[in-house]
Image (cartoon, rainbow, N blue to C red):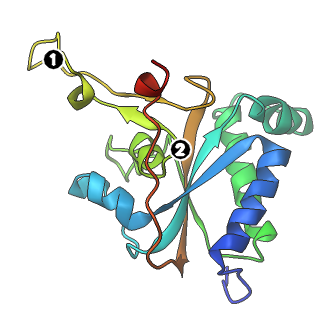
Amino acid sequence: MSSAGCVKNIEKIKMVLEEDYHASGLNYHFLKVGWYNEKVTKPFRLNYDPNAAAFVVISSPEMFEKTFIPFLLKRHCIGEGDPLDESLANHLKSLEHKLDGCHLEILQDYQMQGNTRKPRILVQTAGHVSGAVYFYQRKDLAVDPWPVDKRIYGVCLHPRYGGWFALRGVIVFPDVLVGDVPRPTPVDTLVASV
């Protein structure tokens, strides 16, 4: 789709996404592709301009009533694929029309790179660099009780929802480049709540 009529003003895009949040229960948090690429290893880097605008997509508890249930009521689910993933893909794709046909690329949390077992996007890292969630990793532990060779997976906490949310993906706007903007700092809820 041509992006000729696309709203390339990042503030207008944020406004459209904020309006969508009230209708869908999906939260959108801004990040630059370069912020994400700085934090991941080469196989996970995104092949876009480092200044390309992107938004991590977070489903709040309201998403089920506002987006998922209406999708189920409109569709005949026949058991092929995950209905939740399908409803979110359908909703996110509809954003192109709300954004005057902007070219956007949707990288969902479950998608893999080609025939590999590597995800297209590390949503926990994207959530962290956007400031939306704090991605706690092994390196954050003051005392590490596990053996060095034991693999320990990280966990994200949201400052409002705690663990009652899901990182659903990232929307990249390859043609919307932003300059120098302040990088948000995620709230360390474990320290902030003590």
The residue type indicated by label 2 comes to: Ala
Residue mark closest to the camera, 2 vs 1? 2
Image quadrant occupied by the N terminus: bottom right
Kindly identify the residue that appears in the image at 71 percent across and 59 percent down. 93
Q: Is residue 132 above or below residue 35?
A: above
- Residue 76 shown left or right of residue 78 in the figure: right
Kindly identify the residue that appears in the image at 73 percent across and 50 percent down. 90
C-alpha distance separating marks 2 and 1: 28 Å
Q: Quadrant of residue 180?
A: bottom left
Q: Is residue 140 visible?
A: yes
Residue 25 image position (x, y, % from top left): 76, 40
Neighbour tally class for label 2: few under 14, some 14-19, many 20 plus, Cα within 10 Å: many
Which residue is nearer to you in this view: 98 or 128? 128
Disc marking residue 132: 2
Q: Is residue 86 above or below residue 5?
A: above
Q: Is residue 46 visible?
A: no
Kindly identify the residue that appears in the image at 54 percent across and 47 percent down. 169
- Residue 180 shown left or right of residue 176 in the figure: left
Q: Which residue bears the numbered disc 1?
A: 150
Q: Residue furthest top?
A: 145
Which residue is nearer to you in this view: 76 or 12? 12
Which residue is nearer to you in this view: 170 or 193? 193
